[in-house]
Amino acid sequence: MTLPRRFLPSISSLRALEALDRLGSATAAAEELAQTQSAVSRQLKTLENLLGVTLFLREGRSMCLTSDAAIYADKVRGALQQIAQASVNLTVNPVGGSLSLAILPTFGMRWLVPRLADFARLHPEVTINLSTRLKPFSFASEPFDAAIHFGQADWPATQALRLRAEAVLPVAAPDLIAAHPAIQSARDVLRLPLLHIETRPNAWADWFAAHGAEGARITGTVYDQFSTITQAALHGLGVALLPDYLAEQDLATGRLTCVWGGRTEMSGAYYLVWPEAKGRDPALLRFREWLAGQAEDEDRLPR
């Protein structure tokens, strides 16, 4: 189906619209696009005339987008990102295809990346591009084919492959433990400063509940990533609940010690998620089939 020309504006006019929305002025947009301000203004006026709707509010020599135009610009931004990413993928690997993957920084670096050499050996024709994201996002507006996600398999309009559950250990620097009386129960851990991670707001409450200490009053400091909370624990700032795969090296070297108890499996799991529309992409299919062999659970089917 061929769309009328008015619904297929030029890339240059769409880039001008996106830049104006993001930067807030035609002058800044012109500077970023390496054009004159008058050229950018002409492109924006042409776009407005082509669509037949008001896109800009003018105050003196300045202009800003209407609320409807701002929504349009956001969708245009996503489309431009997808075009750019598709162009990069075709240029980098025109034969075997590529996969743009969003990963959780710590899990991606400590669990996935060490395994990727095996995938590269088996599928040298596929290029894997990695970027980090801490929270779920819209596949419609971000240029990713799939993502590594922690939580439940409930990302809208996606399918998922379960990779592994998460078991945690309460760990701290040996000097911190030595400065406190012997820890003989989960409630004794409350006497120590507790370190919280932003992406697991209920982790400590769930851990105490799992050890018979429901309703414990929990305080402490909050960190945004496992890399920072690990450093805080290493420097004696408190007790961190770390995934076992992340804590094992520091436990083996004695830099951290388990405060009390053993591995405790938590709710949620790590998943590979992908949009339903991407389900038959050849590069993604090869990656999923390989990654299923790395998953810890017997049930390796997407769900």
Image (cartoon, grey):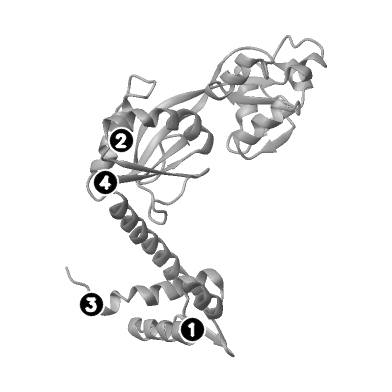
Q: Residues within 10 Å of mark 1 (few under 14, many from 20)?
A: few
Nearest to N terminus: mark 3 or mark 4: 3
Examine the image and state in which quarter residue 140 appears.
bottom left
Mark number displayed over residue 287: 2
Say whether disc 4 or disc 2 marks the residue closer to the N-terminus: 4
Determine contact: label 4, label 1, CB under 8 Å: no
Q: Please, which residue is most extreme toward the bottom here?
A: 60
Q: Position of residue 297 (x, y in %)?
A: 37, 20
Three-letter code, disc 4: Gly
- Of badges 3 and 1, the one in the foreground is 1
Q: Quadrant of the N terminus?
A: bottom left
Residue under the image location 51 percent in, 26 percent down: 267
Name the residue carrying label 4.
97
Q: Residue at x 58, y 38 (%)?
A: 199
Q: Are marks 3 and 1 in contact (CB under 8 Å)?
A: no
Query: What numbered label is drawn on residue 4?
Result: 3
The residue where tag 1 is placed is 36
Q: CA distance from mark 1 to mark 2?
A: 45 Å
Q: Relative to residue 127, is residue 177 drawn left or right?
A: right
Judge whether 50 appears above or below 14 on screen.
Answer: below
Q: Earlier in the sequence, mark 2 or mark 3?
A: 3
Q: Is residue 103 left or right of residue 61?
A: left
Q: Which type of secondary structure does the marked residue at label 1 adopt?
A: loop
Name the secondary structure under disc 2: helix
Q: Amino acid at mark 3?
A: Pro
Q: Nearer the viewer, mark 4 or mark 2?
A: 4
Q: Counting residues from the N terminus, which is met first, the one under dot 3 or under dot 1?
A: 3
Q: Position of residue 112 (x, y in %)?
A: 43, 31
Distance Cα–Cα, label 4 vs label 2: 11 Å
